[in-house]
Amino acid sequence: MIRNANELTPAEKATFEKILGRSIRESESISIHAFEEPKMTLEQKQQIARELERYFEEVDKAALPVREQEYEDAYTEAMRCVRPSYRRHS
């Protein structure tokens, strides 16, 4: 379910603001998604975690080295995509 903040009743808006712990801007949309946690044993979860670790180790091995400035620039660009007012702290 996705609702635009400007379409919420005052009671709905107050409820969402309480859940989020902050006020909601009129230009924002609120998304709610309910899901059940997959039923897995601890052993299954640990196996999946090991497989992911191996996968990411392989990805890391194949990655080309990146200069620190390139990393910082990419990070800043990504942050500004989701937070346009983001400024790098010095």
Image: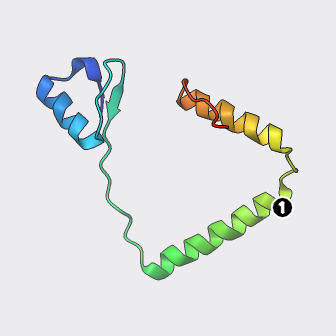
According to the picture, the residue beneath numbered tag 1 turns out to be 61
Residue 14 placed where, x, y %?
17, 32
Choose between 64 and 39: the one closer to the eye. 64
Mark 1 belongs to which amino acid?
Lys
Choose between 34 and 80: the one closer to the eye. 80
Residue 54 placed where, x, y %?
71, 70
| Residue that lies at the very extreme toward the bottom in this rendered image | 43
How is the model colour-coded?
rainbow
> Element at badge 1?
helix
Q: Is residue 11 above or below residue 49?
A: above
Q: Quadrant of residue 51?
A: bottom right
| Residue that lies at the very extreme toward the front in this rendered image | 90
| Residue that lies at the very extreme toward the left in this rendered image | 11
Residue 15 placed where, x, y %?
17, 36
The quadrant of the image that shows the C terminus is top right
Choose between 82 and 38: the one closer to the eye. 82
Q: Quadrant of residue 38?
A: bottom left
Q: Residue at x 61, y 29 (%)?
A: 87
Residue 68 placed where, x, y %?
82, 44
The quadrant of the image that shows the N terminus is top left
Q: Residue at x 30, y 27 (%)?
A: 24
Q: Is residue 83 left or right of residue 17?
A: right
Q: Is residue 57 above or below residue 88?
A: below
Choose between 55 and 65: the one closer to the eye. 65
Q: Is residue 32 left or right of residue 38?
A: left
Other residues around mark 1 within 10 Å, as few (<14) / some (14–19) / many (≥20): few
Q: Is residue 64 above or below residue 71?
A: below
Q: Is residue 47 left or right of residue 23?
A: right
